[in-house]
Amino acid sequence: MPEPDKSGEAGSSPSLPEGVTSEHLLEWLDGMLLIRYFESESVRLSLAGKIPGGIHSSEGQEAVAVGTMAALDGRDVVSGTHRSHHHALAKGLGPRPVMAELFGKATGVSGGRGGSMHLVDADRRFLGSNGIVGAGLGLAMGAALGMKLQSQSLVAVGFFGDGGANTGRVWESVNLAALWGLPLIVVCENNLYAVETHISASMAGTSIADRAAGFGLPAETVDGQDILTVYDTVRRARERAVAGCGPTFLEMRTYRYEGHNVGDVQNYRELAEVEDWRANRDPIGRLRQLLEGTGVLGPGGYAAAVGRAREAVDDAIAFAEASAWPDTADVMRSWPAVPVSAVSA
Amino acid sequence: MSEKLTYSQAYRAGLAEEMTANATIFVMGTDIFLRGGHFAQVLGLGEQFGVERIRDAPISEAAMVAAGVGAALQGMRPIVDLNFLDFSFGCMDELCNQAAKIHYMFGIPVPLVVRATNGVAYGGAQHNNVIDSWFAEMPGLNVAVPSTPRDVKGLIKSSLRLDDPVLFLMDKSLTGIRGEVDGPEDLIPLGRADVVRVGQDVTLISYAASVRVCHQAADMLHERGISAEVIDLRTLYPLDLETACASVRKTGRAVIVDKSAGYGGVSAELAASIQRSAFNYLDAPVGRIHAAHSPVPQSPPLIKAMMPAVQMVVDEVLLLTTSS
């Protein structure tokens, strides 16, 4: 790993947000690259039949997850969406147990009971990716209520997407959070497409953030491809929440490079559009440019970071492959607290 | 020492005892702080426990239940009060896709109670849905359906000590009934039916307000020399099939009585289980008395015409006893 060039940080580099050092930037680069290669490998493994069922790749949306989690305390709660591998990995869930969960193996984060849309880690306070559009936000809102009632100086972050912005439950939760002044950060990842429907065909009004503003909470539109902006916006939202000033709504403009699900035929958007986002607004490319331009990342530094990401993902795949299937005798997983119906035959 | 309380007061008493003992319990619902809920179920608790713990919420069923699930995951023990069970249609995902599944999928318990009033009274089709069975069919949910003040108090206390979601359903037609309740440490476990009347010739199985129908039918049958045993299920999940089947093995006949629309549901589940585990003891087919398969009307004679009545239970028993 190359030594960060401290002089560059003070001199030629653009000013970094409060509390950010070049070491942080290098960690974020690693974090985003891990997600990037985790996702491209997940797509490959899903198409190859190794991962049962499809997955929703977050490739392209790495900065939203890594930048958001970087601004949080480890005890803060995060609740995700159906497209949530990036949230899980950025929240600190290991690539090994996450990949194993995608495979349906016993060593997965949910013991094979969850899958891609039900990743969880109670200790790391990741309360799940979620199979229902808009539903994860409600769980985060409830966790924020719990934090408020327990007088904890913590926050909850609830993710949803532009598709979720057209569900009633999202706005019920935003209203309740604003009404009760909950320590909640509402993050809408607007990647422009709800499955195949472009936002212009699904949303009345000017913007998702403008809708949110009507609920009387601060609502900002954020460049979700710029990790520094994401980090700093979430940091400020967290400060507000912890100070007792209530929730903040952040519409992060981002883009997914893959289709909604693996193997989708994408005749709803032009390849040129995808290429434009990849070439000109890629969150990893942007950070790389900053790091190399300021000398924080020396020659060969980027290739080394890519190598580390590949190594971690390859290791996770090998781990998942080698792991055992869950014990089918325990399929009902009768938790002790769940009383079972008794019949004597 | 026992005292007589109404059905609603018994709920309030059990809740107050548990809230006093456990600071993580709080209630969310519409019109609960001042009004005390539509059935006076938490009347006075606002003053006792304050606005944070008797928490008025907007009419946002999805957000309320989601808030309950999230707060439960954060270490609280929320009660979401939906007032009418009919309003659960607005939070079905939160109940069935989130609350019910999280413990299984994630290994994190969700100690959530959702209280609602069920049953049939006036108010028309949209306020009188009998959908108790829906929730009992959903893996991960428990369903309590008490019929007496004693059971209300004992079961709400147990529900508030359970680590998994409970739909706590209180029959609207029982709101004002009075009865004795037990003390602070007298809990009634979920999953244990109550043999509320001992008999020898037929077993009448029901829950909530239909238990009273069965009692009245048993009185009428007694006059005809037929001894009916009456079983109050008290919870629909867990369902105490053992008690029901043991009774049928003794009496040889069973009639299940509820206010459902009679298609599927708990009565079908019971009938199937009885024929499987008490087949050789049966002297007659299992009878089912339920409402018409129809939305509930508003006009009193129309309601009367479509709901199970005491005479229908009596007639069914007479048919099953004379034909075998």
Image (tube, coloured by chain):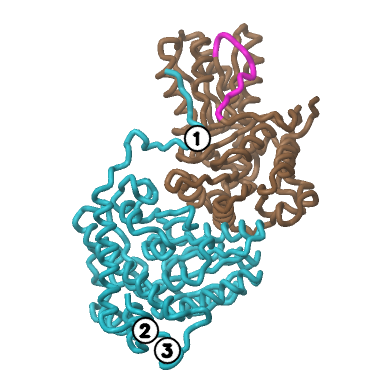
Chain colours: A cyan, B brown
The span from disc 2 to disc 3 (Cα, nearest Å) is 9 Å
Local SS, label 2: loop
Q: Report if residue B197 lies within the magenta region.
A: yes
The residue that disc 1 covers is: A336
Check disc 2: other Cα within 10 Å, few if <14, some if 14-19, many if 20+.
many
Q: Chain of mark 1?
A: A
Which residue shows up at 45% across the image and 28% down it?
A: B268
Does residue A210 appear left or right of residue A334 in this picture?
A: right
Instruction: Mark 1 vs mark 3: give the one in front.
Output: 3
**SS assignment at label 3:** helix
Q: Work out whether B55 lies above or below B120.
A: below
Marks 1 and 3, the one that precedes in the sequence: 3
Label 3 sits on residue = A7
In the rendering, at what x and y percent does residue B216 appear?
A: 66, 20
Residue found 24% across the figure and 50% down from its top = A321
Quadrant of res A4: bottom left
Is A242 inside the magenta-drawn segment? no
Say whether mark 2 and mark 1 are on the same chain. Answer: yes
Chain ID at mark 2: A
Kind of residue indicated by mark 2? Val
Q: Amino acid at mark 3?
A: Ser
Give how far apart the Cα atoms at labels 1 and 2 are: 53 Å
**Is there a contact, CB below 8 Å, between mark 1 and mark 2?**
no
- Residue at image point 51% right, 40% down: B141
Q: In this orientation, which residue lies closer to the viewer: A96 or B18?
A: A96
- Disc number for residue A296: 2
Q: Which residues are magenta?
A: B191-202
Viewer-closest of B220 and B36? B36
User: Which chain does tag 3 point to?
Assistant: A
The three-letter amino acid code for the residue at tag 1 is Pro
**Could you tell me residue A148's position as x and y percent?**
64, 60
